[in-house]
Image (tube, grey):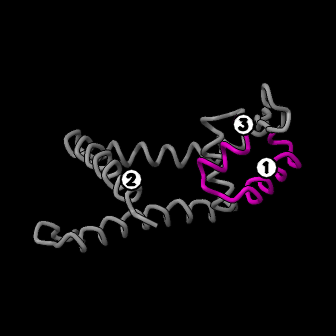
Amino acid sequence: MARDIGASSIASHIDLFFDELHRIDVAYSDYARRAGVSDNVMCILDYLKDHDGASQRAICEYTLLPRQTVNNVIASFVAHGFVELGDAEGDRRVKTVRFTPAGRRYCNGLIAPSRAAEYRAMSELPDELRSALLKGMGVYGRVFRKQMHDISV
């Protein structure tokens, strides 16, 4: 049921916004569970799909997952033959993560369906609403990041 947000307060708008973001997160989590993998595995695969050869540090920074979690998931991928570790150019201490052919198939089998769902969901929005959504998220994101940065701690 759609709620009337026209007469809502800023606080209720915030609640509606973050409730919807949460429901989107729950949909991703439910998909991962049904696919038989953890949210962390899905998050790392989703990142690596577009950043094959990324360092474990880059994976941690983007996904906001703890280093130990990323290391454990990557170690599991290595054990299953899904990825190979290599040395980063200029710093052998930094390990890069590259898909093997089997790993690329594994990744595509899990990530392609969720990306297709994202595409179908976005394509169901009229052009004007899609543009407004993206513009609004961009503006809100910039303002929110500035507000968070300006907090004195």
Name the residue carrying label 3: 104
Which residue is located at x 76 percent, y 34 percent?
A: 98
Point out the tag, 1 or 2, that comes first from the N-terminus: 1
Q: Is residue 73 magenta?
A: yes
Name the residue carrying label 1: 74
Between the residue at mark 3 and the residue at mark 2, the CA separation in whole angstroms equals: 34 Å
For the residue labelled by badge 1, is the local secondary structure a helix, a strand or a loop? helix
Which residue is more in the foreground, 12 or 79?
A: 12
Between the residue at mark 1 and the residue at mark 3, the CA separation in whole angstroms equals: 14 Å
Give residue 25's mark: none
Which residue is located at x 83 percent, y 53 percent?
A: 76
Drawn side of residue 141 relative to residue 129, left or right: right
The magenta region covers 54-83
Q: Position of residue 3 (x, y in %)?
A: 20, 71
Residue type at tag 1: Ile
Question: In the picture, residue 39 is in which quadrant?
Answer: bottom right
Which residue is more in the foreground, 63 or 128?
A: 63
Which residue is located at x 77 percent, y 59 percent?
A: 68
- Between disc 1 and disc 3, the foreground one is 1
User: CB of mark 3 within 8 Å of CB of mark 2?
Assistant: no
